Image: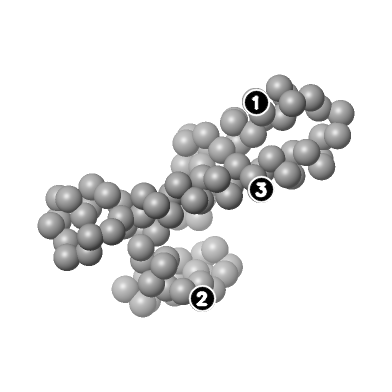
Amino acid sequence: MDSSIAQFESRLGIVFRNRTLLELALVHGSHVNEAQDVRTESNERLEFLGDAVLDMVVAEALYHERPEAGEGELTATRSALVRRESLAEVARSVG
């Protein structure tokens, strides 16, 4: 697993300080249920937190990059950027 994580870090260009947290982030709830894994926790709580952080970061960037845009336009643009399909495309681009 360490070599896989090292390759992942290399593709992203970052080094994770807490690999245990990274491993948890990669555990889908269906894996815990289907594999009857001894791990009782999935990434769902981290996903909840990550979604909120991503929304905030994108909202702040849009707020500063588009000072002329109204709330409705900013909301629609943020929604388009953080939707599942857009995030899946980014994930595919880093493998």
Q: Amino acid at mark 1?
A: Ala
Q: CA distance from mark 3 to mark 1?
A: 15 Å
> In the drawing, what numbered circle is on residue 76?
1
CA neighbours of label 1 inside 10 A, class few (<14), some (14 to 19), many (20+): few
Q: Amino acid at mark 2?
A: Arg
For the residues labelled 1 and 2, say whether their Cβ atoms are less than 8 Å apart: no
x, y percent for residue 60: 73, 44
> In the drawing, what numbered circle is on residue 17?
2
CA neighbours of label 3 inside 10 A, class few (<14), some (14 to 19), many (20+): few
Camera sees residue 92: no
Q: Which residue is mark 3?
A: 57
For the residues labelled 2 and 3, say whether their Cβ atoms are less than 8 Å apart: no
Q: Is residue 72 above or below residue 10?
A: above
Camera-nearest residue between 69 and 3: 69
x, y percent for residue 67: 86, 34
Q: CA distance from mark 2 to mark 3?
A: 21 Å
Residue 15, by quadrant, is bottom right
